[in-house]
Structures are given as C-alpha cells and as structure tokens.
C-alpha cells in the first residue's frame, strides 16, 4: 500500500512542477526602450509604439522613453514604432522577449 501512495504522489508532483516552470518562462514581460532619430541620435518625443493591427500600444514620453507590457499571446505579433516624418519600423515581438534591458530604436527620416 505504501509504494502505491508514493507512486501516486510522484505522478501528481511532476506535472505540477512542470506547469509552474512553464508559466514563469512564458509570462507577461515589459518591453522598455528609447526611440531616437537615426541621423542625429536625438530622442523622439511622443512616438507611437504598438502591436500591428491590435489595440495594444503606448506613446513615448517627452524624452523618447516608453514601456509596453506584453503577454504570451502577443509572441506571434509585430511591434510597430512610428512617428510623423519618419519611416515606421516593424519587428517581431519575439526579438524583444529576452532583452531584459532598455532597447534603443532608431527611426529614419522620410
């Protein structure tokens, strides 16, 4: 009887441990960065940062800094950064998933 109880406990413990590890690895993450002009390297205030064709996004502050929280469902999406007078920049969300630091995004004038 005792070996059966130990076996049952082991069978239930392994899936629970696996589930908790998967959730930590693929939870929400924050994309943080600064948007600058490619030519003069000056920050671009109030540029738009969002997911292409989705109602998820934010606006950079007066010094070009932004933060956008993304969920695991957004991994297949594309981030679009745009500002009037500059060419829009599009990158897959996956490129930023493990950055863990502030990224610098350069926009080129039209």
Image (cartoon, helix red, strand yellow):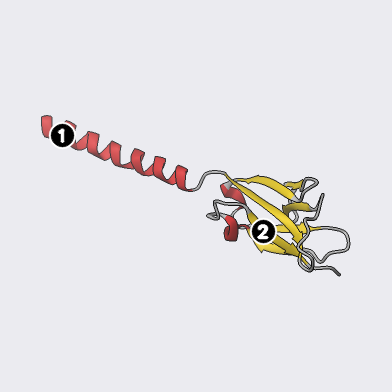
The answer to whether 84 appears left or right of 29 in the picture is right
Q: Residue at x 81, y 66 (%)?
A: 87
The answer to whether 77 appears left or right of 20 in the picture is right
- Of helix, strand and loop, which one carries label 1? helix
Q: Position of residue 40 (x, y in %)?
A: 79, 65
Q: On screen, 75 above or below 17?
A: below
Please name whichever residue, 91 or 1, is drawn nearer the observer in this view of the structure: 91
How many numbered circles are shown?
A: 2
Q: Position of residue 33 (x, y in %)?
A: 67, 52
Please name whichever residue, 14 or 33, is drawn nearer the observer in this view of the structure: 33
- Of helix, strand and loop, which one carries label 2? strand
Q: Residue at x 11, y 30 (%)?
A: 2
Q: Residue at x 58, y 61 (%)?
A: 95
Q: CA distance from mark 2 to mark 1?
A: 57 Å
Q: Residue at x 29, y 37 (%)?
A: 13
Q: Position of residue 69 (x, y in %)?
A: 64, 44
Q: Position of residue 42 (x, y in %)?
A: 78, 59
- Which of the image's four quarters has the N terminus? top left
Report the residue marked by disc 2: 104
Label 1: how many Cα within 10 Å (few below 14, some 14–19, many 20+): few
The answer to whether 2 appears left or right of 110 in the picture is left
**Residue furthest out toward the right:** 85
Report the residue marked by disc 1: 4
- Which of the image's four quarters has the C terminus? bottom right
Instruction: Choose mark 2 or mark 1, whichever is in front.
Output: 2
Of label 2 and label 1, which has the lower sequence position?
1
């Amino acid at each position: 009887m005792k070996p059966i109880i130990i076996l049952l406990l082991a069978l239930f413990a392994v899936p629970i441990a696996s589930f908790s590890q998967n959730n930590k690895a693929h939870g929400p993450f924050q994309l943080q960065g600064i948007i600058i002009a490619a030519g003069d390297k000056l920050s671009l205030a109030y540029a738009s940062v969002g997911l292409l064709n989705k109602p998820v996004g934010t606006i950079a502050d007066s010094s070009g800094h932004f933060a956008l929280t993304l969920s695991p469902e957004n991994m297949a999406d594309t981030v679009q950064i745009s500002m009037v007078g500059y060419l829009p920049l599009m990158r897959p969300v996956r490129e930023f998933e493990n950055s863990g630091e502030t990224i610098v995004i350069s926009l080129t004038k039209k």
